[in-house]
Image: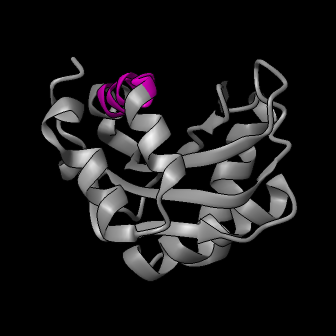
């Protein structure tokens, strides 16, 4: 599963300004609502509910919030680079500045897990992460996430 299957170019937010984890999740829900036509509140509630189970801050300044919605037709991702890192209660207690929101249909099962795994593998590439942090261009971020090294990060 390639990231290009999960992420459209208009789903990249290159310089998101937020002051807290809650505000970050609200902004991501708002963006996801525009892309999916699902009410913002429904998306926010699903990702907040997942966060209550345990932080999706995976370390190294990266978070992968995710959730399942019965109204969504396909697995959809949104990538955001934050202007200023926020506390995300991450596993390593480091603030988060790179976020990949993943939304999947209720019945996605293994595909949802494969997508999460793929995102985590790609974002473990230190060179790629450095490039993502160094640019404010949405098109460059999209290209970095989809270039050959990212699709071969298996």
Residue 135 visible to the viewer: yes
Q: Residue 54 falls in which quadrant of the image? A: top right
- Along the viewing direction, whichever of 149 and 9 lies nearer the viewer: 149
Instruction: Magenta stretch: give its range.
Output: 114-126
The residue under the point 46% across, 82% down is: 34
Q: How is the image coloured?
A: one colour
The quadrant in which the N terminus is found is top left
- Along the viewing direction, whichever of 91 and 131 lies nearer the viewer: 131
Left or right of 95 in this view: 79: left
Relative vertical location of residue 67 with respect to residue 94 in this rendering, above or below: below
Left or right of 101 in this view: 125: left
Left or right of 130 in this view: 60: right
Task: Indicate the position of residue 28 as horizontal and vertical percent values.
Answer: 60, 65
Q: Residue 43 falls in which quadrant of the image? A: bottom right
Count of number-bearing discs: 0
The residue under the point 37% across, 22% down is: 121
- Along the viewing direction, whichever of 66 and 57 lies nearer the viewer: 57
Task: Indicate the position of residue 127 as horizontal and vertical percent values.
Answer: 40, 29
The residue under the point 39% across, 69% down is: 138
Which residue is outermost to the front?
134
Relative vertical location of residue 68 with respect to residue 117 in this rendering, above or below: below
Task: Indicate the position of residue 44 as horizontal and vertical percent values.
Answer: 68, 63
Q: Main secondary structure of the magenta part?
A: helix
Residue 116 visible to the viewer: no
The quadrant in which the C terminus is found is top left
Queried whether the magenta region covers residue 75, the answer comes back as no
Relative vertical location of residue 23 with respect to residue 97 in this rendering, above or below: below
The residue under the point 49% across, 38% down is: 130
């Amino acid at each position: 599963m390639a990231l290009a299957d999960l992420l459209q170019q208009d789903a990249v937010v290159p310089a998101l300004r937020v002051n807290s984890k809650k505000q970050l999740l609200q902004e991501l829900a708002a963006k996801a609502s525009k892309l999916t036509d699902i009410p913002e509140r429904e998306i926010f509630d699903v990702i907040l509910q997942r966060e209550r189970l345990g932080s999706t801050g995976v370390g190294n300044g990266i978070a992968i919030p995710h959730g399942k919605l019965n109204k969504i037709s396909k697995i959809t991702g949104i990538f955001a680079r934050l202007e200023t890192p926020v506390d995300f209660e991450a596993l390593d207690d480091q603030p988060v500045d790179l976020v990949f929101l993943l939304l999947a249909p209720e019945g996605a099962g293994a595909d949802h897990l494969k997508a999460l795994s793929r995102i985590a593998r790609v974002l473990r590439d230190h060179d790629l992460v450095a490039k993502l942090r160094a640019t404010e261009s949405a098109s460059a971020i999209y290209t970095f996430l989809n270039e050959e090294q990212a699709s071969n990060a298996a």
